[in-house]
Image (cartoon, helix red, strand yellow):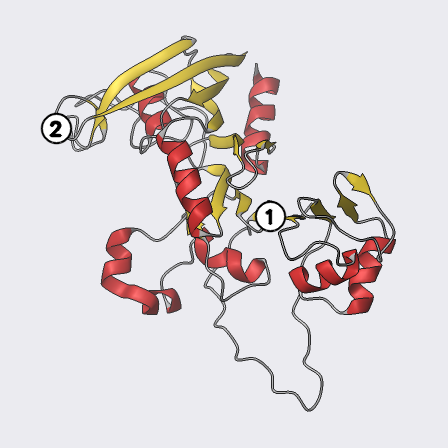
Amino acid sequence: MLLHSYIVAKGEGKQTLASFLRAKLNLSWSKARELVVKHQVRVAGQPTSDPAQRLKVGNRVEVHGFSPVSTTPKQGKKAPPKTKAPIHSGPMPIVVYEDDAVVVVNKPAGLTTMRHAEEKAEFGERGKHYLPSTLADLLPPLLGQPDRPLRAVHRIDRDTSGLVVFARTTKAEQNLTNQFREHTVERRYLALVRGQPKPGKIESILVRDRGDGRRGTGTGEDGQDAITHVKLIEALGDFALVECRLETGRTHQVRIHLGEAGTPLCGERVYDRPANGKPFPDGSDAARPMLHAAKLGFKHPETDEKMSWTCPLPDDMAKLLEQMRNDD
C-alpha cells in the first residue's frame, strides 16, 4: 500500500494538518480533511482524526493508502500542458515508501532501473519518445509529479525484481551514494539456484572479461573486490532457495558468484558456466534468472533514522518455488 511520509520542516510548524497535506499532496481542502477523518494519517507515529491539529517542527506525517490522481481543470482555467506518457506495457512498479527525500520502489522483472550513460549521450531527451521506459521514467508520473525527476543512486538488473531506492534531492543523493560506497546499506537477495550451494562467504576480484567475454573472477587493473554471503534457506532436490547478503554491490555480483560456484541461478543464461566451459544443465524451465532483491535498509539521509523494507517474491518466482516444493 502506497505510503507518503514527510518531516515537518522549519517554517511548516504550527500550521494545521489539513493545510500541510493540502500543500504536500496538491489536494483540495475537502480531500485533505477526508484523508484525516478516514484515519489514513499518522502524526509522530500516532493516528489522528483531527484536520485542525497543529504540527510541530520535526513531526513525521505519514499518509497511508493514498495515490495521487490527476484532476480535471475547472472551466475557465487553462489546462496544464500534457506530458507524453512513458512507453511501457509490462507490470508497473509499486511504491512502498515515499517522503521528501527518498522513494523506495518494488521493481518488476523486465524493467531497466535507469538509462545507461551511453544511451543518454547518444539519444538525450528524445530517446524517451521511442526507447523502452526505465523505472526512473515511470516513477515521476506515478507519484503525481511528472516534471520532478528522481535521482538513481544504485541499480538492479533488468531481469531482477525487488527493492530500489531513489533520491529526491542532491543532499539525499550524496548521502545515499556515500552509504552505498561505504557498504553500510543492507541488501539481501533471494535466489532459486541449481544444486545445493555451500553456505558461507564468497570473495573474489571481478573484472569485465574473465577470459571468455563475460564478467567474472580474474585479475587486471579494472578488478573490484566483491563479497557475497550465501545462506541456504531450503533444499529442494536438484534446486535450492538461498539468501545472498551483499557486502559489496558490483555489477552482476550475485549471478557471477553463484554461477562460478557451480550453482547458477535457475534461468541464468550468461553466468551459468565456468570460464570457457559448457553451461550447467537447467531443468527448472525458468524464463528469467530467478533473483529477487527482497530486503533493503539504510539510514534516512535527513533524519539518520535506520529504515528497512522487505517485499515478497514476485508471482513467477513464487510459483516456481511452489512447484519445486511439490516435486521434491
Q: Are marks 1 and 2 in contact (CB under 8 Å)?
A: no
- Name the residue at 26% across, 17% down: 204
Q: Nearer the viewer, residue 121 or 191?
A: 121
Is 78 left or right of 86, judged from the image as shown? right
Question: Looking at the rendered structure, which numbered label has been put on residue 250?
Answer: none
Residue underneath mark 1: 98
Residue 173 image point, x, y percent? 42, 46
Label 2: which residue?
A: 221
* Residue positioned 82% across, 67% down in the render: 30
- Residue 230 makes an appearance in the image: yes
The answer to whether 234 is drawn above or below residue 18 in the figure is above
Q: Nearer the viewer, residue 9 or 230?
A: 9
Residue 210 sits in which quadrant? top left
Locate residue 224 relative to residue 72 in the image: left or right: left
Q: Judging from the image, what secondary structure is the residue with disc 2 in?
A: loop
Q: Amino acid at mark 1?
A: Glu
Image quarter (top left, top right, bottom left or bottom right) of the C terminus: top right
User: Quick one: which residue is furthest to the bottom in this view?
Assistant: 76
Give 205 or 133, whichever is nearer the viewer: 205
Q: Earlier in the sequence, mark 1 or mark 2?
A: 1
Percent across and percent down for residue 121 are: 24, 60
Left of 271 or right of it: where is 97? right
Going 39% across and 22% down the picture, which residue do you hit? 247
The answer to whether residue 238 is seen in the rendering is no
Residue 48's x, y, as percent?
Answer: 84, 46
Measure the C-alpha gap from mark 1 to mark 2. 40 Å
Circle 1 residues within 10 Å: few <14, some 14–19, many ≥20: many
The residue positioned 78% from the left and 58% from the top of the image is 16
Say what amino acid the circle numbered 2 marks. Answer: Glu
Q: Residues within 10 Å of mark 2 (few under 14, many from 20)?
A: few
x, y percent for residue 53: 83, 53
Q: Quadrant of residue 272?
A: top left
